[in-house]
Image (cartoon, coloured by chain):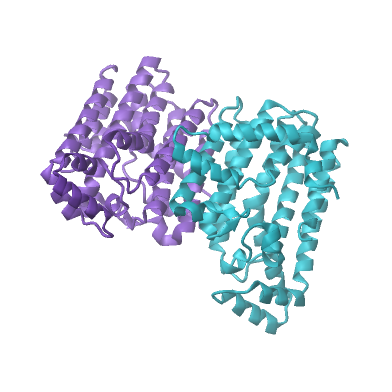
Chain colours: A cyan, B purple
Amino acid sequence: MPALAALYEPIAADLEKVCRIFDDELFSELPVVNELCDRVRRYRGKMLRPALLLLSARACGKRTEEHLTLAAVVEMVHMATLVHDDVLDDAEVRRKSPTIKCLEGNEAAVLLGDYLISHAFHLCSSLDSQYAARLIGATTNTICEGELNQVCHRGDDDLTPEQYLAIITRKTAVLTAACCRLGAYFADADEKTVDALERYGLSVGIAFQITDDILDIVGTEERMGKTLGRDLEKHKLTLPVIHCLREATPEINQKLRAHLRSPHPKRELLAGYLRSTDSIGYSLNAARSHVESAIQALQHLPPSEARYSLQHMAKMILEREQ
Amino acid sequence: MPALAALYEPIAADLEKVCRIFDDELFSELPVVNELCDRVRRYRGKMLRPALLLLSARACGKRTEEHLTLAAVVEMVHMATLVHDDVLDDAEVRRKSPTIKCLEGNEAAVLLGDYLISHAFHLCSSLDSQYAARLIGATTNTICEGELNQVCHRGDDDLTPEQYLAIITRKTAVLTAACCRLGAYFADADEKTVDALERYGLSVGIAFQITDDILDIVGTEERMGKTLGRDLEKHKLTLPVIHCLREATPEINQKLRAHLRSPHPKRELLAGYLRSTDSIGYSLNAARSHVESAIQALQHLPPSEARYSLQHMAKMILEREQ
């Protein structure tokens, strides 16, 4: 399996330009605002969304200036959701540096997220066409719905796998789908290719969120670089738990429900229940089938370095837990 | 002084259409989202910003479909800032109904504000031109800066009148200025007229915020329909306090500083200090001079029912405290 840096090779120079656009857009005349934004930069992880957008463009044979702008826009949207998630989640550690919330209180976190989302739309409005603004507006609408729906279903032990899938599609996969669609669309790809890349992005996003939720239960904080067990703490049901509640013996089901409702549920105890039904294995299989759909969608494209990268980025999602 | 309803007469039918656009845009397939949005509707106050936009359009002799869309957009932006302000402010009562924050916790308030801002930009992207998206994006950028700057200056007893003016211009007046500019611009007014209406909107916004800050000290909660004394509680310095700190005797200055730093400062005690320097009178005079600038800017326009309304809306700002 090639490393992520090797897969990013076709877009390494592009990503540097995206970082400059990102920084220029966020620059403020007010020093306090710049100080806060410096902290946001540390949130920057693998730049997965800009990479998906740029690789989709390259896989369609064309990378324009608009792609660079849009790559910065989608990263800003993603950062805004991370910063506001910290307000929602009370997370203490994210990407191994103190979260914005810890540093400056809830107020600054809310405002900084707003600053990011506002600049995302402002940057997007610099393009000539409204196509991207419409798609990104529709996407952020859906992300908010997904997050609101998730908050409202917290503590709902009867959440079905279908409801879970609807939530993660909204809160995660629509953005990765939009990234790939924008990459293809602005490369002047034909409609079928644009649709195929959007399907790829959607499947990748779903698979990514399923494994993220698995790792929240069985991952190590050191490797992940963030506080884990938050879903459990917040009584958010994810696929392994949903599966276990449906497949376990009545006795274990009862114990698990009681444990989920306890004030400080323990990851280790949960993992024990999940083993009895092989619910981690079931969830990994679900992720795997979405990865396969993603790779399937890429068959529509001619072979290229960028398509190779997209294929292997999808496969890497399944290696995250090792 | 005519009542607000009479001043809204030229745009009463327009405002009803704006409400429908607003509701249609926020409608979701998810019942939980609609439930939350129903609560937002109760926040709707005087619809000052849509009214400024539509009256500016009418004062320039033309009201298009784009104006209706944009009036809904600016109201959504304003609502989003109110909802997020509640997270920031811990306000208990706003417009005499429980705040979103009280009803559903910080999480839902953050997400609902995000939902509103996302839909504002989404609705804005339905227009053909990027002009409005650019102006509104730049405006929300500035609003966030103003709010961030205000949070960072909390507890700063050396805040100058100039710094205060810069904060309220950013957090309040740029939006009212943008409303008036958009009204004129989309009515195809010439550049000088567009600029004049923008100046009107800026002055009105500044005057409005100064009186709002005065009322936070000397208003009655029953009349205002919201919790007062929040600025004091949060150690946010506003014009009356800034003036008093500069003009008071050293003895009163010292007492006032100590009082501002106390855990539960009292509005009544503060009012006593402010009387010694007539700082409320000074602040009202400052508001009055901005109202005069606003009315001055309107001289550029031909007389009309809409111009009359804009003039008297500016004058009404000074009557708010009575």
x and y percent of residue A83 in the render?
A: 55, 50
Which quadrant would residue B171 be assigned to in this image? top left
| A318 versus A125 height, above or below | below
| B193 versus B54 height, above or below | above
Q: Residue at x 41, y 61 (%)?
A: B103
| B290 versus B115 height, above or below | above
Q: How many marks?
A: 0
Residue B259 or residue A50, whichever sits in front: B259
Q: Residue at x 60, y 64 (%)?
A: A230
Residue furthest right as drawn: A303
Q: Is residue A224 found left or right of B8 in the rendered image?
A: right
x and y percent of residue A136 in the render?
A: 60, 39
Residue furthest bottom as drawn: A251
Q: Residue at x 53, y 25 (%)?
A: B129
Can I make out residue A38 in this image? yes
Q: Is residue A252 found left or right of B179 in the rendered image?
A: right
**On-image quarter of the C terminus of chain B:** top left
**On-image quarter of the N terminus of chain B:** top left
| A87 versus A141 height, above or below | below
x and y percent of residue B148 in the render?
A: 42, 43
Residue furthest front as drawn: B250
x and y percent of residue B275 in the render?
A: 12, 45
Which quadrant would residue B201 be assigned to in this image? top left
Which quadrant would residue A14 be assigned to in this image? top right
Q: Is residue A64 found left or right of B293 in the rendered image?
A: right
Residue B63 or residue B184, whichever sits in front: B184
Can I make out residue A297 in this image? no
